[in-house]
Amino acid sequence: MERNVVTQRPADASSTLCPVSRSVEQVGDKWTLLVLRELYMGATRFEDIQIQTQATPQMLTTRLKALEADGLVERRPYSDKPRRHGYHLTAKGQAFYPVIYALRAWGERWCKGEGEAVAVRMVHRACGHDVGLASICPHCGAPVTRDDLEAHVSEEFAHERAARREAFKRKG
């Protein structure tokens, strides 16, 4: 398997020791977070990520290159003719998952309209119970990581995602 060796982007002259500031430098914009969301949901191909993030090709290319340079994503070829690459999370990228999980929980609690259903339920693979917005399974008490969870997209969110794919096909 071909692997690209990527070094981190150089810190700018105004760098700080603040870990929050340094983290925001790498992942602190909407598009980057949406790209990471799609990678966690299993997308690896440029087109699939573009459809669900609704980023322009230029925007997505820029974000993927930055994530690669920062060591969160690596490109792997999946086709030789034509040459195509998929995007995969590195260990560093996988380690960011608790932040996305926390944003999901916060968004489900504070950014929804009254009566809206939960968009994505996380089910603990080991016991089969919904963990809700917690990082500990309320049924069995086990702490959960991304590998322990299975995402169940609500019917409404599944329709929204399918509509994006259809709209993309019509444009193309």
Image: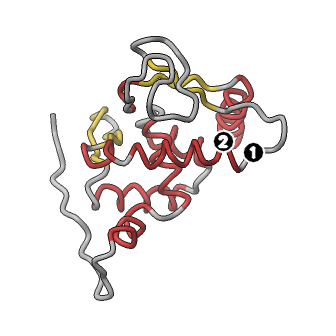
* Label 2: element kind: helix
Crowding near the residue tagged with mark 1, few <14, some 14–19, many ≥20 C-alpha atoms within 10 Å:
few
* Label 1: element kind: loop
**Image quarter (top left, top right, bottom left or bottom right) of the N terminus:** top left
Where 31 falls versus 20 (above or below)?
above
Tag 1 and tag 2, C-beta contact below 8 Å: yes
- Residue 149 drawn at (x, y percent): 44, 24
Where 49 falls versus 148 (above or below)?
below
Q: Which residue type carries mark 1?
A: Lys
Q: Which residue type carries mark 2?
A: Glu
Kindly identify which residue carries mark 1. 112
Which residue of the protein is positioned furthest toward the right in this rendering? 114
**Image quarter (top left, top right, bottom left or bottom right) of the C terminus:** top right
Q: Which label belongs to residue 108?
A: 2
Which residue of the protein is positioned furthest toward the top in this rendering? 127
Which residue is drawn at the image coordinates 42% and 61% (left, top)?
27
Left or right side of 132 for 28: left
